[in-house]
Image (cartoon, grey):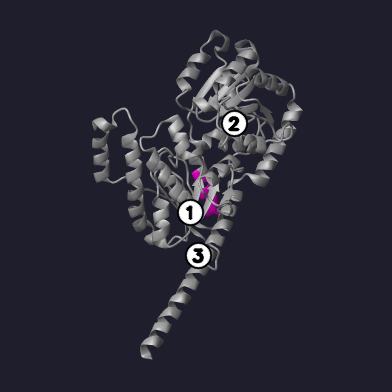
Amino acid sequence: MARESAIVRIAYLTADFGVPVLGTKGASAHVRGLAQALRADGHDVIVLAANIGGDAETGFALQEVPFGAALLTLYDALQDEEICKGTRLAKDLRNLLYASSLELQGRLMLEEFGPDLIYERQCLFSTAGLELARYFEIPLMLEMNAPLVQEQEEMRGLSMPLVATAAERLVLTSADHVIVVSQALRAHATGLGVAPDRLSVIPNAADPEMFGPPQGPSSIKRQLGWHDRFVIGFVGSMKPWHGVDTLLEALELLGGADSRFRLLLVGAGPELPNLRERSQRPALAGCVHFAGAVPHRVVPDLLGAMDLVVATYAANAAEYFSPVKLFEYMAMSLPVVAARIGQACEVIDEGRTGWLYTPGDTHELAGLIRMLANSVEQCRVVGAAARDRVMNEYTWHNNARRVVAIAEDLIAMRTSRDRERRRRQAFAQASLARAGGA
């Protein structure tokens, strides 16, 4: 029920074991950024998560919801079943069972909290948010960050695609409102049956206080011995679709070890071993540094060591992403070069807030980097304009206010419907009483 104080009590669910709320992933930064902004605006927020992980700071209530000792024992045994070997069946069944566990435990955990709204980050097989919203008779807002079933089938495989699809359609079409992070996802959601008037596009964002323009010379650059070098940087997961290998190829085209260019890579992932191996080529010896996965609070200092930042994508990458790195780059007032794909084309105004290149085209990328390395003033002006754009459109506080505005409408509509239902029930009871007394 809505409160006159306009404080909304939000239960934020994330049932994805692959998203450690306090971890280093972009998805982790997303959960924290939105929850912290909601709390900073005075709303009561509790995050219920499958995986807390990491050591990032929080400004909101956070509760890890365990799988349950009995279910965990069964899951361990399930992995040894012959039918599960070499497949994802055990993990898929774990996710399916966890949704029920989260729902049952969530009822107990949220009873005293008394939520006005369930806000759930969509997860494969999860119907927990929908069931909790029904239990508490409050609205459900569902946040969609990827076409999960399609993505899972293409990248990792699914053992129960029909069940996963049924769960996805159920939660998307039953939610009171669906938030998607890109226009491409909006089209995907409508294709799954979500009514356009129940859909909003809210891209990812940055915290401009945490990610502010660098102040003075970089100590990291000095420690690396690169104080007189032009440092190209990338922050993110080293996954195939990110195409980070194109940065190494571009660096070779720029002259590699014999040039003034250096490459600083921040993050981890399955492609990291291959990238490390490639960086050992004689042409690149000593000019690539791998910082690895680092706490989110360290990322601004590493970005401060970069003269230019790149958001790479492979030539065959999907277009539905909303990369957190892009907004954090821009918030730092750094000159940004991004692959011309998906949301980057909407966020970056070519030559005004950044530059775009054809995904996978290392020659075009190298040419842009060389040009910008000789255009210091242009980089400064464009970097400042990029930060202005983030401040105006892409902060977690802006996103939180949009979420709350939608939530308040949903709560008001639910309250109005409840009031009308009670009026009709009272009328029916009075009519029966009169009929009985006649």
Location of mark 2 (residue): 303
Which badge, 2 or 1, is on the more N-terminal residue? 1
* The quadrant where residue 67 appears: top left
Instruction: Tell me where residue 359 appears, x and y as whole percent.
Output: 61, 25
Question: In percent of the image, x 60 and y 22: which residue is there?
Answer: 360
**Label 2, label 3: how far apart the Cα atoms are:** 45 Å
**Label 3, label 1: how far apart the Cα atoms are:** 13 Å
In the image, which residues are magenta? 31-40
Instruction: Tell me where residue 285 appears, x and y as whole percent.
Output: 55, 12
Location of mark 1 (residue): 175
- Disc nearest the viewer among 2 and 3: 3
Location of mark 3 (residue): 414
Question: In percent of the image, x 45 and y 30: which residue is there?
Answer: 155
**Label 2, label 1: how far apart the Cα atoms are:** 38 Å
Report the magenta stretch's main SS.
helix
Q: Secondary structure at mark 2?
A: helix
For disc 2, the neighbor class at 10 Å (few under 14, some 14 to 19, many from 20) is many
As displayed, is residue 139 above or below residue 236?
A: below
Instruction: Tell me where residue 77 appears, x and y as whole percent.
Output: 23, 36
